[in-house]
Amino acid sequence: MTEPAVTVQNLTKVFPIPFRRTKLVAVRGLNLEVAPGQVYGLLGPNGSGKSTTLKIILGLVTASAGTTKIFGRDSREVGSREAVGFLPENPYFYKYLTGAETLRFYGKLCGLRGKKLQARTDELLALVSLEEASDRRLGGYSKGMLQRIGLAQALIQEPKLVVLDEPTAGVDPAGSREIRDLILDLKRRGITVLLSSHLLAQVQEICDRVGILANGVLVREGRVEDLLAIENQTELILENATPEVLGQISALLDQTKTRLVEQRRPQTTLEGLFLEATKTSPAPRDS
Amino acid sequence: MAELQHRSFSLGRIAALTGNTFTELVRLKVFYFLLIFALLLIGNSLFMARLSFQQEFQVLKDVSLGAMSIFTSLLAIVATAQLLPRDLEDRTIYTILAKPVPRYEYLIGKLAGVLLLLGLSILAMSALFLALLFVREQMLMSETLRETAGLRPEQVQAAIRSLEESAFNANLLPGIVIIYLKAALLAALTLFISTFASSNIFTIVVMVFIYFIGHLQATAREYWLQEHGGGWLAKTFLALVALAFPDLQLFNLVDDIVAGTAIPPGLFAQTAVLGCVYTSVYLFFAWVSFHGKAL
């Protein structure tokens, strides 16, 4: 049986609040699984526990309860991160390094050396279209360029799983589209992607599966098309329909020249689902 | 995916972190303080023109070694205090620790970067100081030979020997090593405090306090023992104080060196080992505080 790329079981994270007796429950009893090769979107409003969940998966934060695994290895083990690349939200890399130096630095942390490191650096600079800027210091990079060099460093050791925290936050529409295309390219190459985002239209476009978090609880989870389908409705898509035809459509459909192009279940938008799911979320957050 | 066998300890990863920390500090232009050191020495030389050569060499050594000690200590504290807060604020720490890098390697790499910077700084300062010492010695030697031209050879030899003894002596080198170890200790302690400090200003303020307490604690300890006797409770308490506030006076061998007193090899070795132990203990404390820290 294929090992899931990410397994989260009964995950809970409680942050004590200094000088108060209350505690903040950031994540509560979370269970989720990401299959290899999938693009999985973790959605939720600010403070819903998305970043905390990602950080626990990456071993940056310790869970209060539950387990997280990466390809079957406990994610607290440093060695499990051989298989992971991570791009945090709004990252600022070392401004004094050039694009190429940045990639070489992260490559060395992953054990790459010599010609192999140089080849990988060149390959990634080409992938994120930063060859021209490779010798410029990051202090002079635009936001979109920083996101792209960030994505390149996440890919330096050819990971099987890439974790992206708000990969398009603060990036203009063109830059955002470039990052979307890069994620789709990763998917084509069989790399698993776990991302959190607020850009719901984009998530709907690229994710195979989504989970919606609200107040630390997973309130919806599943394949995007399943979640968006509305069971008790039918959608008719008509071509060249006149207002009269529309008025009599249900009765006269068989007798008019209007062509029935497609008959299927209509869908809501991911945005609609997200707002509905987070509006009806449970739970006060303090315990 | 590239099949890379993960090793729990890698000198390659530490070297990458060390090199990056060193580059960061160099590009922050912390070396500017060397310019101040050079100006101090030049200013000092102008002032010394009016002194006898023994006094001149004594003042030169006193000022140079004292300045070296203060500058390296300050550099150790200020350079180290900002490393962790900056990485946390810029979130670069996430990208580093999300790679297969154990947290102890991250800390070792950061500290090693500072120690490399301190080492090069102290080498540059020593080179400047010894060069000045040599130049002044040669100038005074010519003057002495000119002034003693009519005297007997024994008298000339005695004058030259006296001059040479006042200038360079081998004790300067272990003295400089001890100054470096004191700075290393302060860097490790600063790193430890920065693992739980709320800001780098807090770290620097705490370290300034520790620096002064560290220099005064030997006197306070003697007074305490005189007043309260040397029972095991008092000794345990004093040992804990010595751990929290290192006895920096032990690393202050400048006065002896300037006075021309030889540093016994035993004392040098003992002080050097103490410096290394303190540095290692503080690095271990830093790891204890940092290894489970939520980032």
Image: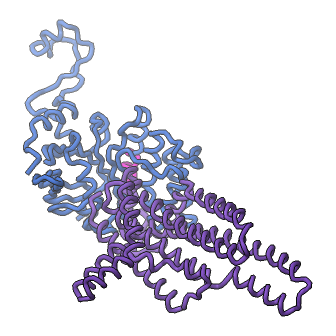
Chain colours: A blue, B purple
State which quadrant residue B283 falls in: bottom left
- Answer with left or right where residue A225 lies relative to residue B224: left
Q: Quadrant of the C terminus of chain B?
A: bottom left
State which quadrant residue B293 falls in: bottom left
Q: What is the x, y in percent for residue A281?
A: 10, 40
Residue at image coords 44%, 77%: B249
Residue at image coords 54%, 91%: B265
Residue at image coords 16%, 60%: A9
Q: Which residues are magenta?
A: A183-190
Q: Quadrant of the N terminus of chain B?
A: bottom left
Q: Is residue B4 above or below residue A192?
A: below
Q: Is residue B221 above or below residue A116?
A: below
Q: What is the x, y in percent for residue B193?
A: 35, 64
Is residue B6 at least partly visible in the picture?
no
Residue B168 lies within the magenta run? no
Is residue B124 at least partly visible in the picture?
yes
Residue at image coords 36%, 67%: B192
Q: Is residue B147 above or below residue B44?
A: below
* Magenta-colored segment: predominant secondary structure: helix
Q: Looking at the image, which is closer to me, B286 or A267?
A: B286
- Answer with left or right where residue B175 lies relative to residue A9: right
Q: Looking at the image, which is closer to me, A216 or B243?
A: B243
Furthest-top residue in view? A244
